[in-house]
């Protein structure tokens, strides 16, 4: 990665310049990224940082993966947008290969993860009325506490995070919230009005919370028995992150509806999708749902290239092999500033001793040492490096974390 030309405005200048003109809906770390490649980024002064966040899994293949950049460039020279008013020559191939990769039948292309979740909710309700026979406007969807599915008005209606909810009511009805990883509570909440159970196979924003073995299989069995849909939000957990193409594969489960996003766009363009059984997505008819940019030729070209990378199995293997390195490294830090962690593949939630600082404070200390992570809640940080990271780079990042914790203990 070549160093950028240092601009006349420093990081501090650019951060100050944002204050009066950008809505303050994020609290980013005080680093201003100017260029990136692979697992590394540079700020405007030319300092290098190892990216251990990877855009919350949007950069599973690293920054500017050459095959993805090549696919984007080829498409940019041909056609970028038609809207769905017309067909384009890239969309059918993308949908066909994505459906085959996931073991499902049909694809509804969208742009952002939140759009995929909103679309999944609409589809589940439509299916409940037209196929299951739920009376009009009475469909319910069961969700898990501590979920994170996005921040639209409907989605925050069933969030238990008051930061996301407070001040945004009135909220959308039709949701029942039960504890995560509790099959008995889930079964008690499901009834004849239930359209779907919507869960994350691993709760990312909550701190990479992994359910007990058998939970996902239990959700699958319950939803099949009670004639409702199993909707799996794999926007963060999917596409190689956990060592499998999908996190549900760790229990051999195939949901009725799969929500994808983030890594599907290769870190280049926003691409998301609802992938489902034919019986489910066939409830949509022209005019009932849409998106101007959903399924655009550029997105389809990049998404197809992402699917091609995953079809090789290379990135799933890397996540498994390097995930063992990550787990071993974190195990060695337990009792040395780390009080616990949860990890699957190249994804971990790390609970730091609160006496050493909040997750935000630990993230800032790591940033000063050239490693970028992000906190979740309290004293928890999450690690989600690109699947292209090397073993040496990963070991170096863990050593930096150890050093930061040792100095602060």
Image: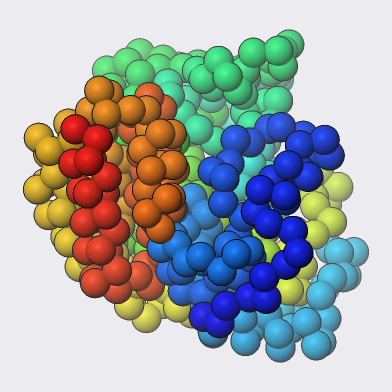
Q: In the figure, residue 325 lies in which quadrant?
A: bottom left
Give how far across and how far down residue 188 sits, in percent: 35, 13
Depicted 268 relative to depicted 197: above or below: below
Give the farthest residue toward the right.
85
Residue lying at 60% horizontally and 23% vertically, measured from the top left: 164
Front one among 354 and 242 = 354
Residue lying at 33% horizontally and 33% vertically, measured from the top left: 380
Depicted 346 relative to depicted 62: above or below: above
Question: According to the image, what is the colour scheme of the structure?
Answer: rainbow
Give how far across and how far down residue 268 sits, in percent: 64, 68
Whether residue 246 is visible: no
Whether residue 356 is visible: yes
Front one among 282 and 164 = 164
Q: Is residue 166 rendered to the left or right of residue 293?
A: left
Give how far across and how far down residue 159 sits, in percent: 54, 22
Front one among 23 and 221 = 23
Q: Is residue 105 rendered to the left or right of residue 369?
A: right
Residue lying at 42% horizontally and 21% vertically, measured from the top left: 145
Give how far across and how far down residue 280 sits, in percent: 58, 46
Residue lying at 41% horizontally and 77% vertically, measured from the top left: 311
Number of marks drawn: 0
**Which of the image's four quarters has the C terminus?**
top left
């Amino acid at each position: 990665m070549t160093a950028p030309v240092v601009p006349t405005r420093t990081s501090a200048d650019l951060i100050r310049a944002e204050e009066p003109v950008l809505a303050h809906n994020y609290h980013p770390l005080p680093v201003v990224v100017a260029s990136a490649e692979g697992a590394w980024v540079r700020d405007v002064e030319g300092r290098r940082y190892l990216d251990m966040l990877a855009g919350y899994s949007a950069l599973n293949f690293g920054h500017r993966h050459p095959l993805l950049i090549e696919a984007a460039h080829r498409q940019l020279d041909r056609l970028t947008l038609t809207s769905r008013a017309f067909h384009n020559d890239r969309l059918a191939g993308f949908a066909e290969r994505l459906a085959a990769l996931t073991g499902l039948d049909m694809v509804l292309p969208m742009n952002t993860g939140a759009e995929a979740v909103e679309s999944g909710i609409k589809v589940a309700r439509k299916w409940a009325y037209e196929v299951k026979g739920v009376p009009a406007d009475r469909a319910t969807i069961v969700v898990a506490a501590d979920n994170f599915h996005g921040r639209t008005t409907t989605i925050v209606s069933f969030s238990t995070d008051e930061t996301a909810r407070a001040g945004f009511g009135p909220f959308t009805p039709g949701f029942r919230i039960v504890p995560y990883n509790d099959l008995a509570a889930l079964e008690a909440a499901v009834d004849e009005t239930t359209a779907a159970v919507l869960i994350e196979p691993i709760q990312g924003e909550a701190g990479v919370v992994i359910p007990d073995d058998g939970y996902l299989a239990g959700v699958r069995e319950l939803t099949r028995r009670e004639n409702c849909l199993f909707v799996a939000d794999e926007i963060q957990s999917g596409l190689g992150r956990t060592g499998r193409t999908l996190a549900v594969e760790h229990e051999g489960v195939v949901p009725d509806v799969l929500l994808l996003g983030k890594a599907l766009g290769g870190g280049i363009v926003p691409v998301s999708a609802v992938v489902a059984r034919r019986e489910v997505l066939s409830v949509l008819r022209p005019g009932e749902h849409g998106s101007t940019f959903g399924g655009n030729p550029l997105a389809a070209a990049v998404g197809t290239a992402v699917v091609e990378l995953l079809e090789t199995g290379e990135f799933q293997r890397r996540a498994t092999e390097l995930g063992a390195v990550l787990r071993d490294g974190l195990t060695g830090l337990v009792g040395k500033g780390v009080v616990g962690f949860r990890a699957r593949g190249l994804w971990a939630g790390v609970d730091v001793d609160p006496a050493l600082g909040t997750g935000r404070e630990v993230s800032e200390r790591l940033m000063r040492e050239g490693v970028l992570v992000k906190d979740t809640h309290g004293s928890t940080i999450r690690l989600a490096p690109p699947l292209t990271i090397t073993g040496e780079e990963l070991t170096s990042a863990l050593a930096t974390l150890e050093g930061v914790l040792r100095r602060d203990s």
